């Protein structure tokens, strides 16, 4: 229990630049308080003391604004930042080193018993207001954008944004940013909301500019090769003309 608490406090220092002292974290961080209360309620739940587990869970919700069902499984070094409005369902599983921001819901989409809440693998980060719904899996080190609604699995190291959430094409995004920087365009002004027609148009222009750059580089290479071949041919002809006749 105390080892878990030490880790909870240490992880706040790593992920929250506003944290100053251990005493401040222990006394004023609702995410830390919610995890302490959850460990007690989860232990009671596993001991088949269901009402008592729910009661401690309810106390934790009342004190912190964070609702964690006592049946949920939470790993080590999990950080709940701010925390107000976070809801974590009964069959949710949160792996080690995950981060949840305020307003996150790990909810279900069915009234059937059994696994009905998400599983977060190690190192997942979920932005403020995001809803992750159903018995889906969010892969290791994946990121969920703020206010996204995720109803399908997200692979490892991917980024999901939007409603409904879709996986960003990281390579294409990097190419667009590089092209935007080349032409003096503010890349940070280009969002990833594919539903916005203006952003769609900007992405099309950046993709077209990138394709033109590739075509120009190809042409330059071909011209250089032709020039070298012509120069070599002229040089060979010049040497041949200067050879003495037998």
Image (cartoon, grey):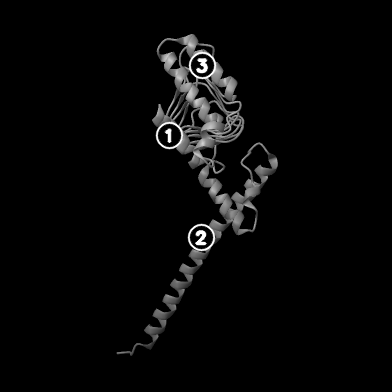
Q: Position of residue 106 (x, y in %)?
A: 53, 24
* Of the pair 39 and 92, the residue shown nearer to us: 39
Assign the C terminus to one quadrant of the image. Answer: bottom left
Marks 2 and 3 sit apart, C-alpha to C-alpha, by 67 Å
Horizontal side of residue 145 vs 46, given as left or right: right
Marks 2 and 1 sit apart, C-alpha to C-alpha, by 57 Å
The residue pinned by badge 1 equals 6
- Under circle 2, the secondary element is helix
Marks 1 and 3 sit apart, C-alpha to C-alpha, by 22 Å
Tell me the crowding category of disc 3: few under 14, some 14 to 19, or many 20 or more residues within 10 angstroms, Cα based.
many
Sooner in the amino-acid sequence: mark 2 or mark 3: 3
Sooner in the amino-acid sequence: mark 1 or mark 3: 1
| Farthest-out residue, front | 23
Residue 59: which quarter of the image?
top right
* Of the pair 81 and 145, the residue shown nearer to us: 81
- Under circle 1, the secondary element is helix
- Which residue is located at x 51 percent, y 13 percent? 54
Image: 135 above or below 9: above
Residue 136 visible somewhere in the drawing? no
Which mark, by number, is residue 104? none
Q: Position of residue 111 (x, y in %)?
A: 54, 12
Assign the N terminus to one quadrant of the image. Answer: top left
The residue pinned by badge 3 equals 56
The residue pinned by badge 2 equals 218
């Amino acid at each position: 229990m105390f080892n878990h608490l030490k880790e909870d406090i240490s992880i706040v220092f790593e992920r929250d630049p506003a944290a100053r002292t251990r005493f401040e974290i222990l006394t004023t961080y609702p995410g830390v308080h919610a995890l302490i209360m959850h460990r007690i309620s989860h232990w009671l739940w596993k001991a088949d003391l269901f009402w008592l587990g729910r009661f401690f869970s309810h106390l934790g919700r009342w004190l912190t604004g964070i609702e964690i069902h006592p049946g949920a499984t939470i790993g080590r070094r999990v950080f709940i930042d701010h925390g107000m409005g976070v809801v974590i369902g009964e069959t949710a599983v949160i792996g080690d080193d995950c981060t949840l921001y305020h307003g996150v819901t790990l909810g279900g989409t069915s009234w059937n018993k059994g696994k009905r809440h998400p599983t977060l693998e190690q190192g997942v980060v979920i932005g403020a207001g995001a809803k992750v719904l159903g018995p889906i899996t969010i892969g290791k080190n994946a990121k969920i954008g703020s206010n996204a609604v995720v109803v399908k699995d997200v692979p490892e190291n991917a980024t999901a944004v939007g409603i409904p959430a879709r996986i960003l094409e990281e390579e294409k995004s990097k190419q667009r940013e590089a092209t935007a920087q080349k032409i003096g365009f503010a890349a940070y002004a280009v969002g990833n909301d594919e539903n916005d027609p203006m952003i769609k148009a900007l992405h099309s222009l950046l993709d077209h500019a990138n394709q033109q750059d590739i075509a120009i580089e190809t042409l330059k290479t071909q011209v250089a090769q032709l020039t070298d071949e012509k120069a070599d041919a002229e040089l060979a002809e010049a040497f041949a003309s200067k050879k003495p006749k037998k």
